[in-house]
Amino acid sequence: MKLFKKKSAAELSPGLVTMQRSCGDGFALPAAVYPCEKELYDRLRCAVPIIDAAIIKIIRLTGGFRVKCSDERYQQELDSFLENVPVGLTGRSVGCFADNFLDSLLTYGSAVGEIVADSGQRRIAGLWNGDISRVRISAGAEPFSRSYTVTAPNGGSRKIAHPERILYSSLTGGNSLLRGLPSLSGILMRIYGCIGQNYDRAGNVRYAVTYKPSGTGGDMMNTRERAQQIAREWADGMKSAKYGQVKDFVAVGDVDIKVIGAENQLFDTNVPVRQLLEQLIAKLSIPPFLLGLSWSSTERMSSQQADILTSELEYYRRLLTPVICDVGNAFLASIGSEASCSVEWDNINLQDETALAEARLKNAQAREIELRLEENE
């Protein structure tokens, strides 16, 4: 059984493999994601480290998985393929593909990939994670079928010859997880910019050296020369301090040295910064303690936040499961098998297993006590 229907050379020339070579790392995504929007989200992750850290944490916490084949005869061959399938130019394994797919899904709201066939069109050569901003999706000729159009850098476009090889998924509504955050992030970055300017002005200590002549004739005549000499010696002492040398400043007469801006206090930015971070974290749906934010919270609150995060991760797993199954089913079809795949995810954390084990232990102890009471009666 062949995985893909054999096409002529004329039909294959505008196909995905040729498009991959001309478009680089793959292709783009739906009509809801435009290049300017994609660039905005990319810059947002670079400008606000906590957003990038939250997305990476979500990807890692989503956990690993195992793909099971309905026919055990093909299980070992399926495992070998999923562990060693090339992904792009540098990746390997379906887990690497799923991580990149989820990263695009969270950042842009949609993700696309491609199952690349070999030159004979019979086996799978590898997987590609596509550039989401360069694919447009429209309804196909049949119900629930989709047609994909790739836009080239020069502005041209062409339809993908093998839409059955495309792996596509989107969040609810197709909106990015970062939607609504650019405005809040802009305010946050302005606050940080002002903090830097304030430290440049008041935090970087500057000195005012004032020389007051005594009023005698000789002192008044040499005021200019003495002021210049004090300035030279003071500059030499400050310059030596940069290289770890300590020089004392000795002057004759009434010399006053003050720190410029010492009486001014820097603004307290803890409240506005925390308010903005709370909004960001509420949108990202991740507990603050996972990002290193030591906000005051009770143990009960942390447990509830962990439960909310678990439900979010289960949602992302539901989106990834069909994509992973499509890859496994395509491989089984390419080797002539009619079996199907299913995905078994690892436990999100060991706390759930611990709670279940404790519950089983207490139920067993309660049952033992009941049996003893019945025997005594």
Image: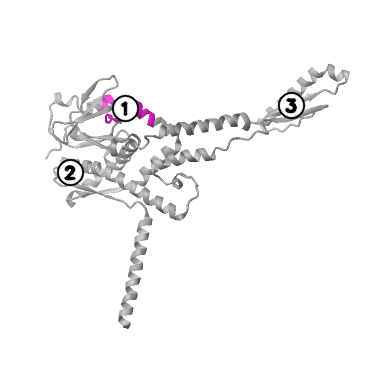
The numbered mark, 3 or 2, whose residue comes first in the sequence reads 3
Residue 166, quarter of picture: top left
Residue 86, quarter of picture: top left
Which residue is labeled 2 in the image?
A: 332
Residue drawn at point x = 27 percent, y = 31 percent: 30
Observer-nearest of 281 and 70: 281
**Residue 30 lies within the magenta run:** yes
SS at badge 1: loop
Q: Residues within 10 Å of mark 1 (few under 14, many from 20)?
A: some
Of the residues shown, which amino acid type is indicated by label 2? Leu
Which residue is labeled 3 in the image?
A: 209
The numbered mark, 1 or 3, whose residue comes first in the sequence reads 1
Residues under numbered marks 3 and 2 in contact, where contact means CB atoms less than 8 Å apart: no
Point out the residue furthest to the top here.
221
Point out the residue furthest to the right here.
217
Q: In the image, which residues are magenta? A: 20-41
311 left or right of 143?
right
* Residue 105, percent from left and from top: 31, 37
Of the residues shown, which amino acid type is indicated by label 3? Val
Q: How crowded is mark 2: few (under 14 residues within 10 Å), some or many (20 or more)?
A: many
